[in-house]
Amino acid sequence: MKISTFVANLITDDMTATVAFYTEQLDFKLTMSVPEQAPFNWVLLKHDTVELMFQTRGDFSDDLKINLEEATGGTLLFHAHVVNIAGWFERLQSTVKLAFPIRHTFYGMDEFGFYDPSGYLIVLAEAKGETV
């Protein structure tokens, strides 16, 4: 059995801020949207081989017939390997809500964490000598 892709479809309450954050801060490209012009209900954002989907709460609920007043999941953390962690930190530290500054972990990574506009935690990490 093979899985060719595994893409998160995340709920956002502020699609405009979400799209701006990922395209302006993290260099993602808006590759698909519904509708084709803003304001969007759903978007597909891509950076190299990484894809993320975001959907507004109301559209998600209507589309899947799920009551989002009830809990739909748990805590979510995105952990991404990057090259030049210091450069990423320098670029983002004054424009994002930091969760924690660069630290060296017991598992050999230098990493820092920050939140996107919907409150999802993103951790960028680099192993010494890594060439992603």
Image: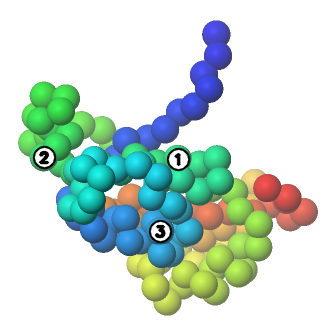
Residue 11: % across, % down: 28, 49
Residue for badge 2: 58
Question: Cβ–Cβ below 8 Å for labels 1 and 3?
Answer: no
Q: Mark 2 or mark 3: which is in front?
A: 3
Which mark sits nearer the N-terminus, 1 or 2? Answer: 1
Q: Measure the alpha-carbon separation of dots 1 and 2.
A: 22 Å
Q: How would you rate the neighbour count of disc 3 (Cα within 10 Å): few for under 14, some for 14-19, many for 20 or more? A: some
Residue for badge 1: 51
The residue at the point 30 percent across, 71 percent down is 17
Q: Which mark is residue 19?
A: none
Amino acid at pointer 2: Gly
Camera-side residue of 112 and 12: 12
Residue 58: % across, % down: 13, 46
Which mark sits nearer the N-terminus, 1 or 3? Answer: 3
**Total residue callouts:** 3
Residue 2: % across, % down: 64, 16
Q: How would you rate the neighbour count of disc 1 (Cα within 10 Å): few for under 14, some for 14-19, many for 20 or more? A: some
**Horizontally, is 23 left or right of 47 in the view?**
left
| Residue located farthest toward the right when viewing the structure as drawn | 129
The residue at the point 41 percent across, 78 percent down is 97
The way the protein has been coloured in the rendering is rainbow
Displayed quadrant of residue 91: bottom right
Residue for badge 3: 23
